[in-house]
Image: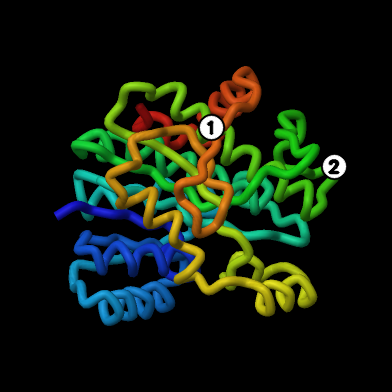
Amino acid sequence: MKTVIVTGGNSGIGKATATELARKGYRVIIHGRDAQKTMIALQDIIKQSGNSRVEAVTGDMSSVAGMKKVAESFRQKTDVVDILVLSTGIILSRRVETADGLEGAFAAQYLSRFATVQWLMPMLRKSPFARIVMVGAPTMKKAAIHFDDLSLRNNFSMMRSMGQCMLASHMFVQEFAKRHPNDNVVMNIFHVGIAKTGVVREVNVVFRGLVKLFGASPEKACANAVYLADNDEVKFSGYFLPKPGKPHVKEKIQYDHAISERLWNTSMELIEPVKEMAV
């Protein structure tokens, strides 16, 4: 039985993806920050999927120490990972600084995903063919990686934060594919579209209202995630699926290689406490 790990799997797109993959017979391990909410989600996934092979780990991944602790919890559950779905994330309308001095959305939306991949790569490589699936969105015009101020202390805005987070995610996928061209591990990102999830819980009421009014259900919005995780056609790496619900439309990610390489190296420095386990 193949093993799936879903970060942020206790709600929204993560939970919907975990449920669908459990229905397909995978062993699923979900992660959530809140223990009670995660255990409720676990029981709900078991009930909806009819699959009892669903487990959970909990932990706050807003800090590097927390990322390390969650990754170690995964390592205690399994020594092989066939599918890794990266679904943690949040949109912040105000600047929040983490224990490591990082901007909160950058830590949750990007760096926690980067750290999880580095930590779990030895387990992914043990799979005959492993897939890393990242929940995402299109990059924004004029978005940039602010290497001189990654924490956005000097000029924070919600849009600036969102732009940096999503560009970083796309560059991560691109750089991963470049560094692992002939591996048995592939990595891709997809556009979730407007979906009714908790990712907007920290933004203003008008924004939340628009999402509630026009957003798709997580069950519909997770179609591309399930495709990237489960379909035998997925032998490619380094691609973005820009059309929600249309998995066969894909675009090769092609940003400045020097910048994506610099971002990778900078990220490795930021996760120094887990760097010794990265490969």
Q: Three-letter amino acid code at disc 1?
A: Lys
Position above or below: 136 against 148? below
For the C terminus, give its image quadrant: top left
The answer to which of 209 and 100 lies nearer the viewer is 209
Crowding at mark 1 (Cα within 10 Å: few <14, some 14-19, many 20+): few
Q: Is residue 64 visible?
A: no
At 77% from the left edge and 55% from the top edge, which residue is drawn? 158
Mark 1 and mark 2: Cα distance apart in space: 33 Å
In the rendering, at what x and y percent does residue 253 appear? 56, 32
Q: How is the image coloured?
A: rainbow
Q: Which mark is residue 154?
A: 2
Residue at image mark 1: 252
- State the image quarter where residue 24 is shown: bottom left
**Residue most extreme to the left:** 1
- From the viewer's perspective, is 178 left or right of 121? right
Helix, strand or loop status at disc 1: strand
Mark 2 lies on a secondary structure that is: loop
Q: Are discs 1 and 2 less than 8 Å apart at CB?
A: no
Please tell me which residue lies in front, 211 or 154: 211
Q: Is residue 266 left or right of residue 14?
A: right
- Say whether residue 119 is left or right of residue 55: right
Q: Is residue 75 above or below residue 264?
A: below
In terms of sequence position, does the residue under pointer 1 or pointer 2 come before the other?
2
Residue at (19, 67) in percent of width and height = 53
Residue 170 picture quarter: top right
Left or right relative to 51: residue 66: right
Q: Where residue 272 sits in the image (x, y, percent)? A: 49, 32
Q: Which mark is residue 221?
A: none
In this view, the residue farthest toward the top is 258
Q: Residue furthest right?
A: 155
- Res. 166 visible in picture: yes
User: What residue is shown at x 51% (from left), y 45% (from top)?
Assistant: 249
